[in-house]
Image (tube, rainbow, N blue to C red):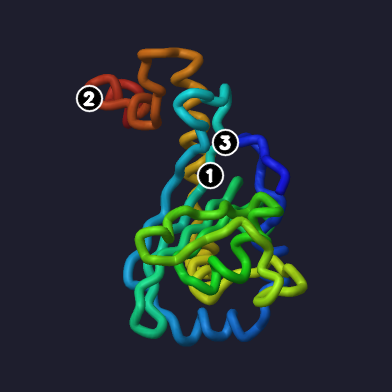
């Protein structure tokens, strides 16, 4: 497996991964699963403490907790751009199907990472291709990520662009607050002086 630079963007867009997802997973995700909790926001890949990147890559992230057959699963989709189908994405899900069938394949494209988060649940994850469960090595989404993607595409706000612009401002003008609309909006006696009735 080739090592990726931490500032590289994922190689697949959401649209590409959705096209390769079998219909049975789409149907199961949209018809049999329900969202029990959701959160939408932004984050950044600033690198490790010992090797901070100069300009971090900002992303929009949709997180959901879903329940399909009694067990709760946690799913994340990070959009490196606005939450639209043609943005590069990084995905992860806590379900065993994702871990054993597609996580390794998506990692080869930079659209996921081999997780170590399964250790406490007694699941051993090895960095090896899914030669039995996904012989053709198709990068696709599990039913939980299908549900997460459908919820993410309903979002309209690009938090990552806003956060990135604020970070650039803070780097350029350390210690100063970035002006907002509220700072520019006239108030008090000055506002009444600017607009006079005739």
In this picture, is 79 found above or below 173?
A: below
In this picture, is 125 found above or below 47?
A: below
Residue 123: give x, y in percent of width and height: 44, 66
Labelled pair 1, 2 in contact (Cβ < 8 Å): no
Residue 86, label in figure: none
> In 3D space, how far apart are the residues under numbered discs 3 and 1 (Cα atoms)?
7 Å
Is 140 left, or right, of 170 in this rendering?
right
Identity of the residue drawn at 44% across and 20% down: 170
Please name whichever residue, 149 or 104, is drawn nearer the observer in this view of the structure. 104
The residue where tag 2 is placed is 188
From the image, state whether disc 1 or disc 2 is nearer to you. Answer: 1
Q: Of the residues under marks 1 and 2, which one precedes in the sequence?
A: 1
Identity of the residue drawn at 33% across and 72% down: 36
Residue 189: give x, y in percent of width and height: 23, 21
The residue where tag 3 is placed is 57
Residue 129: give x, y in percent of width and height: 68, 63
Question: The C terminus lies in which quarter of the figure?
Answer: top left
The residue where tag 1 is placed is 59
Q: Which residue lies most toward the left here?
A: 188
Labelled pair 3, 1 in contact (Cβ < 8 Å): yes
At mark 3, the secondary structure is strand
């Amino acid at each position: 497996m080739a090592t990726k630079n931490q500032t590289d963007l994922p190689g697949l867009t959401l649209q590409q991964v959705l096209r390769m997802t079998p219909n049975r997973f789409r149907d199961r995700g949209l018809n049999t699963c329900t969202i029990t909790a959701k959160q939408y926001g932004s984050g950044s890949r600033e690198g490790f403490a010992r090797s901070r990147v100069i300009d971090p890559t900002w992303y929009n992230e949709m997180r959901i907790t879903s329940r399909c057959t009694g067990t709760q699963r946690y799913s994340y989709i990070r959009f490196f751009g606005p939450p639209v189908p043609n943005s590069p994405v990084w995905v992860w899900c806590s379900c065993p199907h994702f871990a054993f069938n597609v996580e390794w394949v998506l990692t080869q494209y930079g659209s996921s990472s081999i997780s170590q988060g399964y250790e406490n649940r007694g699941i051993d994850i090895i960095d090896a291709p899914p030669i039995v469960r996904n012989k053709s090595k198709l990068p696709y989404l599990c039913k939980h990520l299908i549900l997460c993607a459908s919820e993410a595409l309903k979002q309209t706000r690009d938090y990552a662009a806003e956060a990135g612009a604020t970070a650039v401002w803070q780097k350029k003008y350390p210690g100063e607050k970035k002006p907002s609309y509220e700072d520019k909006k006239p108030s008090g006696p000055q506002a009444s002086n600017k607009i006079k009735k005739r």
